[in-house]
Image (tube, rainbow, N blue to C red):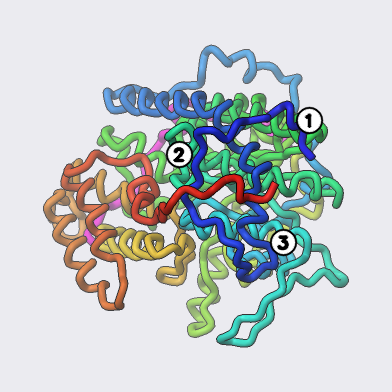
Amino acid sequence: MPSAELYNSSLKGVRVVGEISDKAEKAPSTPRDILTQGALKFIVFLHRTFNERREKLLEHRQVVQKELDDGGHLHFLEETKYIRDDPNWKCLPTHPKLQCRKVEITGPPDAKMVVNAFNTDVQTYMTDFEDSCSPTWHNMIYGQVNLYDAIRDKIDFTNPKTGKRYKIHHEGRRVPVLIVRPRGWHMVDSHILIDDEPISASIMDFGLFFYHNAKYLISQGLGPFFYLPKMEHWQEAKLWDDIFSVSEDCLEIPRGSVKATVLIETLPISYQLDEVLYALREHSSGLNCGRWDYMFSTIKRLRNQKEHILPDRNQVTMTVPFMTNYVKQLIKVCHKRGVHAMGGMAAFIPRKDDPVKNKEALDAVGRDKLREVLAGHDGTWIAHPGLLPTARSVFEKHMPTPNQVYVQKPDTSVSEADLVDTNIIGGKITRKGVDANIYIGLNYMESWLRGFGCVPINHMMEDAATAEVSRLQLYSWSHQKVRLEDTGETCTPELVIELIDQEAKKLATADGNKFSEAAKALTDEIGNKKPLSEFLTQILYPQITTVGKSIDLSSLKP
């Protein structure tokens, strides 16, 4: 048992208002096996210890936004120059099981996805409580159940409609190493209330998984491995590092057992890469290029600087200046500090119905992965098993070693201005781009409201990050009243609202659809009925909460 004296948290002032079922679904365990008294005390202790720091760091994000809105610029921090300039420090060596990460598959923690991911011949599997998962209470708590049982090889179920059996196959093969992505610092979970405030979703997701699985994973020669999303300042990474250290002490496991890869998916933190790794140097397993969220963050943070308005989404590729420069900086810093630099997501869904278009798309994926490996990345992401042969063949051909951390980039120089070089030659904002953003935004948000966070749209696997690009472009274009190149129209809030309402009515054919709610969320912001939210998940989250009566905490398992 964990060291009780370290977190002997009183449960006074704690309420659980989400259902804690004793019903098993596709795994033998139940929510009552996850939200035990011990696990609850652990996450309550972490929340009470660290939540005030979390809230202050979130407030700082708005200070940065105000400075940018007033025409300011982002800078490399003067107060941490000593960290950047010191060539001698490196992160501790990562875990042996994380040395080779050529291809990582990602997806939400529903049982079917978990089994399919573990049965894919990749090195690592990132299970996602964040962008690809709608955070309903059911999804969050049963996601923990699914991982608990999958780790212990207990998942075994048959789809009653198809008769297909889902079981993790261990015989004669290497099972992918599990990495867990909790929700970002900005999210809370309203189903657990601590001293009349909702628990930090990050702490909940991390804490429940860590409490139940850290020791078991270590006993299997693995460890508690994480991906950390959406941070905007190196102090947010330091907050995670302190949580890791305290949690390791609580469970009486060695410091440094946790290994975490940070997703660099916000513009501000791209100016603080050395600092992030320094803060996590005991626990770091590298950085990842979260391309879609990075694009979204750039649009969001620079939305009031007209010179940085980006063109149609399909024109903002990884080869445009600000994206290329961010990648160069990330790879240079990672390898200098001895950790992995992971590439981005290939979101294409293979098409069985059109072999010609399928080949064209796979060729494009291959070119993208070739760009990554030649740039110096140590691995890449896919969202569908069908992309594995393409991604794997490229990385194995051009990186025969487990990684290429040894490839140093001392001559790479990226300036402050380079990271915001949004000049895209030939870039255009079009009515076609407006329509595409509306279609993607509405379809994704509607699915999210029904509990699905990983949504196939136009043969691409869309998640919250790609939907955010659509949302922010619609807001930015309409408020800057840009001219649409293909029609000559001025993109105004009134025009965009009209188009959203028209498309929502066209799409709203099935019973129980949520298109009107999705449209309202978009139009309220564009029409200034509500302030622009930092994240669409915050806008929509109240609509998917299922708050019930407080549970008798004494009825929970010890």
Stretch of the chain drawn in magenta: 407-431
Does 7 appear in magenta?
no
Residue tagged 3: 149
Mark identifier at residue 148? none
Instruction: Name the residue that disc number 1 marks.
Output: 255
Residue 216 falls left or right of residue 548: right
Amino acid bearing label 3: Asp
Residue at screen point 31% across, 72% down:
512
How dense is the environment of label 3, judged by Cα within 10 Å: few (below 14), some, or many (20 and up)?
some
- Residue 385 vertical position relative to residue 14 in the rendered view, above or below: below
Q: Which residue is mark 2?
A: 198
Along the polypeptide, which appears first: circle 2 or circle 1? 2
Q: How far apart are labels 1 and 3 at the CA level?
A: 26 Å
Whichever of callouts 1 and 3 sits on the residue coming sooner in the sequence is 3
Dots 2, 1 in contact, CB < 8 A: no
Front residue (pair 449, 536): 449
- Element under label 3? helix
Give the image location of residue 16, x and y in percent.
50, 46
Q: Secondary structure at mark 2?
A: strand
Query: Which image quarter holds the N terminus?
Result: top right
Distance (Cα) linking label 2 and label 3: 27 Å
